[in-house]
Image (spheres, grey):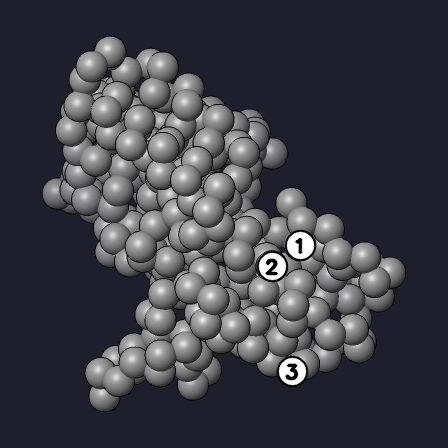
């Protein structure tokens, strides 16, 4: 089995230091839409300068380098145990190179491992097997603590918000999540929404939606229309970049529907900050391609 440790290290470096083109493009469009000389435009200008410096100097885009979330689709017959070791070793090495800050703290003892390793779930790795002739793909998302803290889960119906068990109710609670976040979570951000599932599956799916590109279309026309509506209405709240006011509170919204038990109707909202750090590597026939 090909040793991909150095290649995964490069994936971590790119993810931490080089904001994806679709995210930067949307931020620049947002800058142009804000009023000249406004606090909103000033915040976005600082963000964009930071993006350029991080890329030029190969330094982290944000001082909070976040939780490393790996999504691995591996061909049948490949060892997940070996892949896990490669990923963990790459994360440890990335920490030595300062692409990642040593973030992994034992919640019980308070001890920091100092190298971003943990017992079982740090870094977080999700494996899914694909056909033998399919390439190995590894998606990486670095999710900061600030945006993670404003994530929220609702159980419908919600009488306080007048939200029933339907898409109209989903819209109400997602907009409530934006309102509650206000300037926290480093706006402008992206909303990842999952409807249905159990509590755990719902939160997991809400983060998986964030692997989509900004501006793409949902395969479900009804959900696609709702994504656009929520983004427009969230921006109409006037919260703006970093809560300074303005037209740009949310860059995009991504929604996924799951099956559920009749007794449960969960809506999970995972918020991603403007430092929307995600990258992908594909490996086939020994060749590594980064996206």
Q: Between residue 187 and residue 206, name the one nearer to us.
A: 187
Classify 204 as above or below 164: below
Q: Is residue 104 left or right of residue 197?
A: left
Q: Quadrant of residue 254?
A: top left
Q: Give residue 275's position: percent from left, percent from top.
A: 38, 44
Q: CA distance from mark 2 to mark 3?
A: 20 Å
| Cα distance in 3D space between marks 3 and 1 | 19 Å
Pick out the residue farthest to the left: 160
Q: Which mark is residue 81?
A: 3
Q: Going by the image, does 167 lie left or right of 150?
A: right
Question: Which mark, by number, is residue 10?
Answer: 2
In the picture, which quadrant includes the N terminus? Answer: bottom right
Q: Nearer the viewer, mark 3 or mark 1?
A: 1
Residue placed farthest to the bottom in the image?
A: 109
Q: Earlier in the sequence, mark 2 or mark 3?
A: 2
Residue at figure coordinates x 34%, y 20% from the top left: 31
Q: Taking 130 as reference, is 84 left or right?
A: left
Element on which disc 2 rests: helix
* Earlier-in-chain disc, 3 versus 1: 3
Q: Are marks 1 and 2 in contact (CB under 8 Å)?
A: yes
Crowding near the residue tagged with mark 2, few <14, some 14–19, many ≥20 C-alpha atoms within 10 Å: some
Element type at mark 1? strand
> Residue 250 location, x and y as percent?
33, 31
Q: Quadrant of residue 170?
A: top left
Q: Which residue is mark 1?
A: 281
């Amino acid at each position: 089995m090909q040793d991909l440790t150095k290649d995964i290290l490069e994936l971590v470096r790119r993810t931490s230091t080089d904001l994806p083109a679709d995210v930067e493009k949307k931020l620049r469009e947002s800058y142009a839409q804000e009023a000249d000389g406004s606090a909103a435009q000033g915040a976005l200008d600082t963000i964009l300068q930071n993006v350029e410096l991080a890329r030029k100097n190969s330094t982290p885009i944000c001082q909070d380098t976040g939780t490393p979330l790996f999504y691995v689709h591996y061909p049948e017959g490949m060892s997940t145990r070996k892949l896990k070791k490669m990923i963990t070793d790459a994360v440890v090495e990335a920490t030595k190179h300062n692409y990642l800050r040593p973030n992994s703290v034992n919640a019980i003892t308070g001890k920091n491992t100092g190298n971003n390793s943990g017992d079982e779930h740090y870094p977080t790795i999700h494996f899914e097997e694909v056909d033998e002739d399919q390439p190995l793909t590894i998606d990486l998302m670095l999710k900061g603590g600030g945006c993670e803290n404003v994530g929220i889960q609702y159980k419908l119906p919600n009488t306080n918000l007048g939200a029933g068990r339907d898409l109209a109710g989903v819209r109400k609670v997602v907009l409530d999540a934006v309102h509650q976040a206000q300037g926290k979570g480093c706006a402008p951000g992206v909303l990842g929404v999952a409807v249905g599932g159990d509590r755990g599956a719902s939160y997991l799916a809400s983060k998986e939606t964030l692997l989509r590109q900004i501006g793409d279309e949902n395969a479900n026309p009804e959900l696609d229309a709702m994504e656009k509506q929520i983004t427009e209405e969230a921006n109409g709240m006037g919260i703006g970049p970093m809560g300074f006011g303005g037209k740009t509170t949310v860059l995009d919204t991504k929604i996924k529907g799951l099956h559920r038990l009749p007794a449960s109707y969960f809506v999970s909202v995972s918020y991603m900050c403007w430092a929307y750090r995600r990258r992908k590597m594909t490996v086939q026939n020994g060749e590594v391609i980064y996206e």
